[in-house]
């Protein structure tokens, strides 16, 4: 009888330990140390809701043959600005956020408690400018200038000076030259893609995109006026005429550099330039 009682007691203890996770893997923990993706933050894209964003990640996974380590986000939390998203991560309101490699590495360099992870976001993102369909002639001029800037090494030089060499420090606000009598194009800047699109503490736009515009204006003989808007208001600013062009409109590309049929920013009545910069997609999480 004592043996039977002892056996029952041991069995009850074993079941109790198993129920609280002490007897094996936790039920919500992926096997084989695969990355877990519960809540993923992202800057709100143009034209995609949460379900659309999830479909986008699924489409990317399918196009890439579902690479090892891919985990679809269970919940996507959209943010209107980068600062709010970084703060949400630090407060553990999200598990990680998605961004492009140069942006993620710059943010990690400025925050000792953050790190970049590469296991969950596989596509290549192309940064383009966008204008209304009626601006097709200007788009052609910008495309020709972007092609020339890539071929002569100007883009690489600007990336080196305005992103890589910073090491997390604030970028310098490159002055945009004013060309007497030239047409002026108003461009939306948000400050939400550091160190590409940055607004300094004194309100001055800075970063790679501003340096790129300074060079682009000289090549196409146009003036650029920078207009500060929030990331979620980019599309309405363009449609309403508040601005004539947008920065960092994100298209999706395969490993071979060819455009995939599902861009991240999906706007109607808008034409995007060819990408002026390509970058991989990464995650940023707490160390």
Image: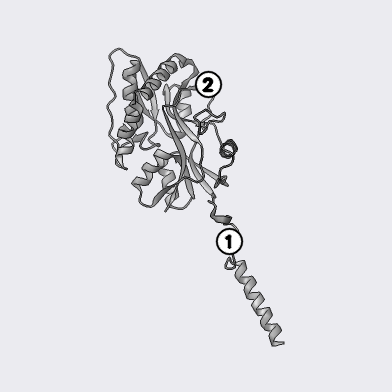
Is residue 111 found left or right of 56 in the rendered image? left
Quadrant of the snapshot with the N terminus: bottom right
Q: Is residue 287 above or below residue 176?
A: below
Q: Secondary structure at mark 1?
A: loop
* Left or right of 166 on screen, residue 81: right
Q: Residue furthest bottom?
A: 2
Q: Residues within 10 Å of mark 1 (few under 14, many from 20)?
A: few
Q: Residue at x 46, y 42 (%)?
A: 282
Residue 181, x across and y down, in percent = 30, 12
Q: Secondary structure at mark 2?
A: loop
Q: Which residue has dot 2 on it?
A: 269
Residue at left 39%, top 22%?
Answer: 146
* Residue identified by numbered label 1: 26
Residue 162 is at least partly visible in this image: yes
Spatial separation of the CA atoms under disc 2 and disc 1: 49 Å
The numbered mark, 2 or 1, whose residue comes first in the sequence reads 1
Q: Is residue 222 visible?
A: no
Q: Position of residue 58 (x, y in %)?
A: 59, 39
Q: Quadrant of residue 102?
A: top left
Task: Between label 2 and label 1, give the one nearer the viewer.
Answer: 1
Q: Is residue 14 left or right of residue 134?
A: right
User: Compared to 124, does 107 lie above or below?
Assistant: below
Task: Look at the picture and state if 133 lies above or below 103.
Answer: above
Question: Residue 209 at what x, y percent from top left?
Answer: 36, 29
Residue drawn 48% across the image and 41% down it: 42
């Amino acid at each position: 009888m004592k043996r039977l009682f002892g056996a029952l007691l041991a069995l009850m203890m074993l079941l109790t330990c198993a129920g609280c996770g002490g007897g094996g893997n936790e039920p919500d923990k992926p096997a084989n140390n695969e990355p877990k993706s519960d809540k993923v933050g992202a800057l709100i894209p143009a034209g995609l809701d949460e379900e659309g964003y999830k479909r986008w990640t699924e489409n990317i996974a399918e196009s890439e043959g579902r690479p090892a380590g891919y985990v679809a986000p269970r919940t996507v939390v959209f943010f209107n600005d980068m600062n709010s998203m970084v703060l949400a991560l630090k407060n553990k309101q999200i598990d990680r956020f998605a961004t492009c490699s140069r942006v993620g590495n710059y943010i990690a360099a400025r925050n000792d408690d953050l790190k970049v992870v590469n296991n969950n976001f596989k596509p290549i993102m192309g940064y383009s400018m966008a204008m209304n369909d009626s601006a097709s002639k200007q788009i052609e001029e910008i495309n020709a200038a972007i092609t020339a800037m890539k071929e002569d090494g100007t883009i690489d030089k600007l990336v080196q000076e305005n992103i890589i060499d910073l090491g997390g420090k604030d970028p310098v606000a490159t002055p945009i030259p004013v060309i007497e009598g030239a047409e002026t194009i108003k461009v939306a800047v948000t400050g939400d893609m550091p160190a590409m699109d940055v607004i300094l503490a004194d309100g001055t736009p800075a970063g790679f995109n501003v340096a790129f515009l300074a060079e682009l204006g000289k090549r196409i003989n146009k003036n650029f006026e920078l207009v500060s808007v929030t990331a979620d208001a980019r599309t309405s600013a363009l449609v309403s005429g508040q601005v004539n062009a947008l920065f960092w409109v994100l298209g999706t590309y395969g490993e071979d550099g060819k455009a995939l049929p599902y861009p991240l920013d999906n706007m109607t009545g808008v034409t995007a330039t060819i990408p002026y910069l390509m970058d991989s997609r990464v995650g940023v999480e707490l160390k």
